[in-house]
Amino acid sequence: AMLASSDTQDQAKEKVSQEFIDVMRQQATDGEIELLENHSATIPLGRSAGFVEGAEVWEEAQKLGVKASGPESLFVPEFELDSENPLSETVFKAISNGKATWQASIGGKALAEKVFDPATGSIVKLLKPGRLDHVALTRKGKACNPDTMMFGACMKSLSWAEVEEPEK
């Protein structure tokens, strides 16, 4: 899973509305979001398979310095990686070994409305519900939303993600 978006103002002076976060969560559950190597990639690394929420995610996010307003304001999709894509294996191994420092950037179409943000004291573009079609990986420090990060990997039935049995 990865923290792919939140209601934190990003470097482009945009914020994602709670309504859009709710729509993105539903899209993730419906398997409508592709994970891409970058925004211009044509072959996906995987597809969404739900999202993660709850107190544990919020506590971990706070420990890591996330500035979002609360647990409901986090978009943490889970992705099922494509076992036929060699780059997916590389991504999985980096995440599961704790060596992935990537951040994330959402992509798609959304309407924006300029509003005053009392949290920052400035005018921001508030992204209203739209259509998210992908989450792209970015290098650390290059994502517009500073909250984005990898949370970890879960191993599921991929030949290169087999779990070793502990010795008895």
Image: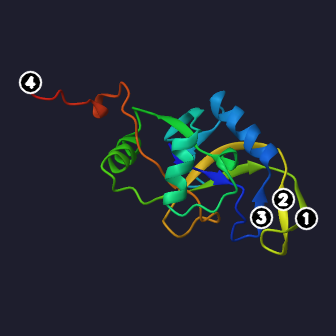
Residue 72 x, y percent position in the rendering = 69, 44
Q: Say which mark, if any, is on residue 14.
A: 3
1 vs 3, front mark: 1
**What's the residue type where badge 1 is placed?**
Val
Q: Secondary structure at mark 1?
A: strand
Taking 113 as reference, is 20 above or below it?
Answer: above
Density class for disc 2 (Cα within 10 Å; few <14, some 14-19, many ≥20) is many
How far apart are the alpha carbons under marks 1 and 2? 7 Å
Of pointers 2 and 4, the one earlier in the residue sequence: 2
Residue at 58% of width from left, 39% of height from top? Answer: 54
Which of disc 1 and disc 4 is earlier in sequence? Answer: 1
Instruction: Give the distance between the C-alpha atoms of the residues marked 1 and 3, in whole angstroms.
Output: 10 Å
For the question of whether residue 37 can be seen, the reply is no
- For badge 4, the amino acid type reads Lys
Query: Does residue 4 appear to the left or right of 159 in the view shown?
Result: right
Chain-order first, disc 3 or disc 2 = 3
Which x, y percent locates residue 63?
49, 59
Where residue 50 appears, as percent x and y from the top left, is 59, 31
State the image coordinates of residue 30 (x, y, percent, origin top left).
66, 27
